[in-house]
Image (cartoon, coloured by chain):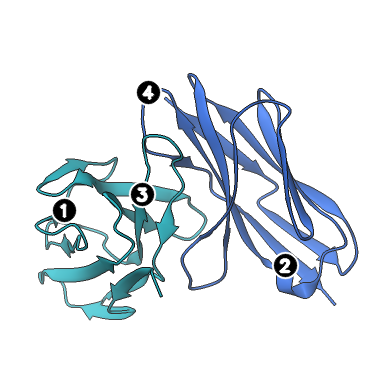
Amino acid sequence: EDQVTQSPEALRLQEGESSSLNCSYTVSGLRGLFWYRQDPGKGPEFLFTLYSAGEEKEKERLKATLTKKESFLHITAPKPEDSATYLCAVRSGGSYIPTFGRGTSLIVHP
Amino acid sequence: DGGITQSPKYLFRKEGQNVTLSCEQNLNHDAMYWYRQDPGQGLRLIYYSQIVNDFQKGDIAEGYSVSREKKESFPLTVTSAQKNPTAFYLCASSGDYANTGELFFGEGSRLTVL
């Protein structure tokens, strides 16, 4: 059974204070690790897909990396508008359906 | 603009009533999904459909029903058999689920049982 664990559950940062969110996973044959952003009361918005260890993707202040056991979402010099819940999901070789973690709630104070 | 439309955004239900949540997409996607989200929990899969006239149970299908008569529509009915239906419901679709797995989500429907 695929498992996804995200940490920390919540993170408070000052504007400009860089940090990382973690997504640890256990799957049988990774067929994709996904990061989503979710604003309060809204549906998740797709950010990145990573397929193999060593892969990196960037979008503005966000950078996602992948190893064989975990993924990191690095946030460089965050702004208050980066405040959201960040969800991680994995898809294994046995299923087309992603399994989601519980998310990390990020608050960036001005 | 292409996207997924869920309605209503807010819904109140009395105990013992069935309610239906609408999900329409104009992305021409084959696969559609329904998830439930509770505070502090991840997204839990209720039902999914990979093609018209076919759908499969997810992890928490009890007390829910769906239909997929048209490619663009995937309504979810929350029946009176669902004992704890108060939650945020999310509909999603995927255009190339076999290869990419990227999901596109609607804005969600919040159901409250009175």
The percent position of residue B27, horizontal first and vertical second, equals 34, 62
Tell me the CA gap for discs 1 and 4. Answer: 26 Å
Disc 2 marks which residue?
Answer: A82
Identify whether A27 is placed above or below B105.
above
Q: Are marks 1 and 4 on the same chain?
A: no
Tell me the CA gap for discs 1 and 2. Answer: 37 Å
**Which three-letter amino acid code belongs to the residue tagged 1?**
Gly
Image quarter for residue A26? top right
Asked if the residue at tag 4 contacts the one at tag 3, i.e. Cβ–Cβ closer than 8 Å, the answer is: no
Front label number (1 vs 4): 4
Disc 3 marks which residue?
Answer: B95
SS class, disc 3: loop
The percent position of residue A69, horizontal first and vertical second, equals 66, 25
- Label of residue A94 in the image: 4
Image colour for chain B is cyan
Within 10 Å of the Cα at label 4, are there few (<14), some (14-19), or many (20+) other Cα atoms? few
Front label number (1 vs 2): 2
Q: Are marks 1 and 2 on the same chain?
A: no
Disc 1 marks which residue?
Answer: B63
Residue B111 visible? The answer is no
Please tell me which residue lies in front, B106 or A19.
B106
Question: The residue marked by circle 1 belongs to what chain?
Answer: B
Image colour for chain A is blue
Q: Reading the chain from its start, which is encountered first: label 2 or label 4?
A: 2
Residue at 37% of width from left, 41% of height from top? B97
The percent position of residue A31, horizontal first and vertical second, equals 49, 29
Identify whether B14 is placed above or below A108.
below
Residue at 31% of width from left, 72% of height from top? B6
